[in-house]
Image (cartoon, helix red, strand yellow):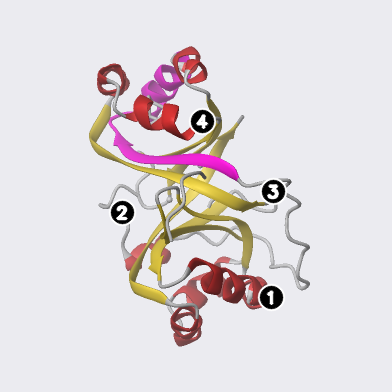
Amino acid sequence: MKQSRFLLMPLFAAMILFFSSCGDNEEKTETDAVTTDTAAAATTTPEPAAVAQPVNIMIVKHKVANFSKWKPSYESHDSMRLASGIHSFVIGRGVQDSNMVMVAVKVDDVEKAKAFSKDPGLKKAMQQGGVVGTPTIMLLTVPYLSASDNSTLRSMVTHTVKDWEAWKTGFESNRQVRLDNGLTDRAYGYDVDDNHKVTVVVSITDTAKANAFMKSDLLKQKMKEGGVVGEPTRFIYRVVQTY
């Protein structure tokens, strides 16, 4: 069941909640690179974020030659993004490679965002910003988006599921399990053209617990129960800018 709706120009030279990673850094070993300067996890399950309606978010991941030079270039193209109904939201930098950048932007109109991603001017702007290689772009419908800011260290996981509704029910029922293992839900959503492609963003509040959980049989079991198909990809990053 496919749905058309809902982490750079550096738009795409520039998001989740999420919710990560240019293929090159989406390795299972990435969890080993997480630092240990985070606080203890919460012990009670927070209420789901009160979202009036799902939001559309575009997430772009790419590598840059120099982050300090790329960021001003990205921000200088804000008017071009706004003209397409695209609003800066979050910028993150990879933990393993700080020049691997994740940009999340909020999108007013999915079709305009799709057109923008194919605009020849975008490629030129990315080159000017020092983007290296081909970016990974995801356009998502996000029904859950938390405003909590308990940690800037995030993990973004993308995987395929057999059934969105069944996965969503199982995922929400295991929120306390994640909290007990140093992870707080930030956002989750699905590809606007295929709700079997799901992206999840969580905050890492206890790195030791989170690292162990990400490698655990318990997580594999929960994902299997939720109907996850194949191997997930994970991108661990730290939020460095919010708008």
State which tag comes first along the sequence, 2 or 3. 2
Q: Out of 116 and 28, give the one closest to the viewer.
A: 116
- Give the residue at mark 2: 25
Residue 91 in picture, x, y percent from top left: 50, 36
- Give the residue at mark 4: 109
Question: Which amino acid, by three-letter code, is at mark 1?
Answer: Gln
Crowd band around label 3 with a 10 angstrom C-alpha radius: few (<14), some (14–19), many (20+): few
Please state, as top left, top right, bottom left or bottom right, where the N terminus lies in the image.
bottom left
Crowd band around label 4 with a 10 angstrom C-alpha radius: few (<14), some (14–19), many (20+): some
Residue 98 lies in the magenta stretch: no
Residue 207 in picture, x, y percent from top left: 55, 66
Instruction: Give the residues drawn in magenta, as a range.
Output: 55-76
For the point 40% across and 49% down, which residue is it? Answer: 193
State which tag comes first along the sequence, 2 or 4. 2
Q: Secondary structure at mark 2?
A: loop
Q: Out of 47 and 163, give the one closest to the viewer.
A: 163
Q: Secondary structure at mark 4?
A: loop
Residue 43 in picture, x, y percent from top left: 76, 73
Which disc is residue 149 wearing? 3
* 1 vs 3, front mark: 1
Asked if residue 149 lies left or right of residue 202, the reply is right
